[in-house]
Image (spheres, rainbow, N blue to C red):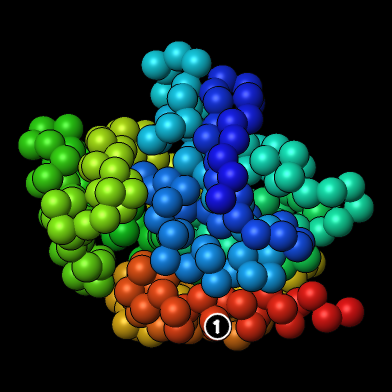
Amino acid sequence: MRTGTLKVPGATLYYEVRGDGPLLLLLPGSGGDAAVFDPIADILAEHFTVATLDPRGYSRSILDTDEPVGELVATQRDDAYRLLETLTPAGEDAYVFGGSGGAVIALDLLVHHPERLRLVIAHEPPCFAVLPDATKQKAFIDEVYTLFRTEGVAAAGARFLQGIGGTMKPMPDPADLPPRAAEMLNRLHANAAPMMANELRPITSYQPDETALAAHTDRLVLAAGRETRGQLPHRPAATLATHLNLPLTEFPGGHSGFTDAPTEFAHQLLDLLLAARVP
């Protein structure tokens, strides 16, 4: 594995690269970082150059100032695009997989830079604004945010997990993990507060440009976990799939399927990616 940094406006991004072949950029969910994809990255790296990153302000990607990021989705999209351009040879297409909040960034990448992308797989984007009951879900997110401000991360996190149907598994104890995984988990705990403060509301209120996406459905896969079927995390991808007349692709596991069932998840993801490489 190779590591690097990339200076972008207002921040320095940390990233990791494995393997060789066409670029596959993996975008973590809100508050996540490059290492969350460790369970699947080596399998994918047998066929792709797999790049993962810490989004700006999280873990090892440092902001130039303490000011919160403005236009968060657009800013993270531009960061991802700059990394993609840095790592992708001229004239070659890239592939993108995003999970949770990373899936929102992946959708926005496809809206703004379709010419550079061969395939985008968006797994359970939490863009609740697309739902028929968007007003109800906004009230839920506002409640979580208020809890964060008044009672702290733990109370807000518990309410959020309850509100999405208890579909995410609890984090393990770092003491029970190998050193790299334990270090990642400690970073994710530290990321929780800035995520609640700055990212929770912009990501969940994101309204994708469905007209722009409709022009590129040949390079879009909307995905969700089998174990979240009927629950809130599953619904935005299913709703967008209906709006865009696309099938919904279900992956093993739940909202974090690549850690729930990593081998099965990685091979299903690889099948989709390799199929898109065929002329």
Classify 232 as above or below 106: below
Q: How many marks?
A: 1
Q: Residue at x 26, y 55 (%)?
A: 178
Q: Residue at x 59, y 35 (%)?
A: 4
Along the line of sight, the residue nearer the viewer: 164 or 119:
119
Classify 180 as above or below 245: above
In the picture, measured across the screen, residue 211 lies left or right of residue 105, that is right
**Which quadrant of the view contains residue 2?**
top right
Q: Position of residue 90 (x, y in %)?
A: 89, 47
In the picture, measured across the screen, residue 142 lies left or right of residue 246, that is left
Which residue of the protein is positioned furthest toward the top in this rendering? 65
Circle 1 is placed at which residue position? 268
- Say which element carries label 1: helix
Classify 174 as above or below 262: above
Along the line of sight, the residue nearer the viewer: 45 or 80:
45
Q: Residue at x 57, y 77 (%)?
A: 269
In the picture, measured across the screen, residue 133 lies left or right of residue 94, that is left
Q: Amino acid at mark 1?
A: Gln
Q: Residue at x 42, y 24 (%)?
A: 68
**Which quadrant of the view contains residue 268?**
bottom right
Quadrant in which the C terminus appears: bottom right
Classify 33 as above or below 130: above
Q: Position of residue 161 (x, y in %)?
A: 20, 61
Mark 1 crowdedness (10 Å alpha carbons): few <14, some 14-19, many ≥20: some
Say if residue 112 shows up in the picture: yes
Say if residue 209 shows up in the picture: no
Along the line of sight, the residue nearer the viewer: 122 or 182:
182
Q: Position of residue 122 (x, y in %)?
A: 55, 66
Q: Position of residue 152 (x, y in %)?
A: 12, 36
